[in-house]
Amino acid sequence: MKRTLQVVMLLLQALLLPLASAAELKVFACEPEWAALTQELAGEHADISVATTARQDPHHIQARPSLIARLRNADLAVCTGAGLESGWLPMLQRQSGNPRVQNGRPGLFEAAMQVERLEVPQTVDRAMGDVHPEGNPHVQTDPRRIARIAEALSARLQQIDPSHAADYAARLADFSERWQAALARWDKRAQPLRGQRVVAHHKGWVYLFDWLGIVEAGELESKPGLPPSAGHLAELKAELATNPAAMVVRAAYQDDRADRWLARETGIPAVELPFTVGGTPEAKDLFGLFDDTLERLLQALK
């Protein structure tokens, strides 16, 4: 009798395990920064998968069957939006057949659409290169905008999972307190960067430059999304001879050959920045992302 009872209890536990797992909110994060932010705000209530890594260009991702399967089961998709994932996310949405994460539904959260965007074009022409009609999508490089995105994401979590609304609100309050303290520290540390002229590999740093007061001295790409050409690099080299820059920066996923050439020809340092969580060993979370970004920029000034 005792053994029968033990068997029954084990069977009940086995049956309850899937229920416990199902109680977690399944989150599909398009980029590492939004996975990290969701983890801060949802904690143990979310089971988070990430579609991309810091070593991948988020503009160009293959819509693999594994990603379709993950999105099919998602309660919430947290993406950048503003056209960043337009080359692959719509295909995932269609193939997944998941009504929760379609455009206009609460299960699709677009971070860039929660804040003011820079470089919103008046007109869009294919000759302009990879220009986003809704503005520059790379908002994750500005911690001030991340603070506002966190508030909007917490509200969305509370909307789609009201049973844990109090926990989400508490975690937002804790994150916001720590984030504002870090932001004050970063602002103070970044003072030497204000007014510095910096060359960018791609139009990925406009929000970082806006936050830090950095002046963009040029771009390695002649047009957004096009590989640096020899002619354009020669023109940029000549311009920098007249108006020097402090450094040239690129994201961890970008080819460094053009950066190294320009650094060799001009004597200005080439700096690899994490761009997102996981882009460098030090950028293990959102706080580390900005700690390491500032550290690398300040070291380049020396």
Image (tube, helix red, strand yellow):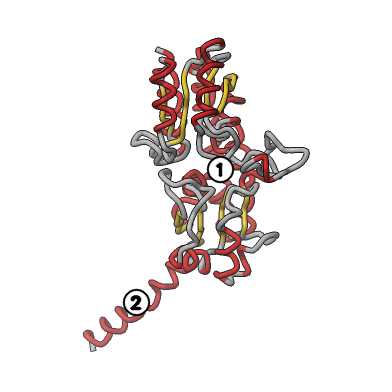
Q: Amino acid at mark 2?
A: Ala
> Which of the two residues, 130 or 48, is positioned nearer the viewer here?
130
| Direction from residue 135 to residue 50 in the image, left or right | left
**Residue 179 seen by the camera:** yes
> Which of the two residues, 59 or 164, is positioned nearer the viewer here?
59
Q: Residue at x 68, y 34 (%)?
A: 118
x%, y% of residue 114? Answer: 67, 44
* Residue furthest top as drawn: 242
x%, y% of residue 40? Answer: 48, 45
> In the rendered image, which residue does mark 1 sit on?
172
Number of marks in picture? 2
Q: Residue at x 21, y 85 (%)?
A: 3
Q: Earlier in the sequence, mark 2 or mark 1?
A: 2
> In the rendered image, which residue does mark 2 sit on?
14
Q: Residue at x 49, y 43 (%)?
A: 33
Q: Amino acid at mark 1?
A: Leu
- SS at mark 2? helix
Q: Quadrant of residue 255?
A: top left
| Direction from residue 124 to residue 139 in the image, left or right | left
> Which of the two residues, 134 or 101, is positioned nearer the viewer here?
134
x%, y% of residue 83? Answer: 63, 49
- The answer to whether 226 is drawn above or below residue 46 in the figure is above
Residue 260, disc: none
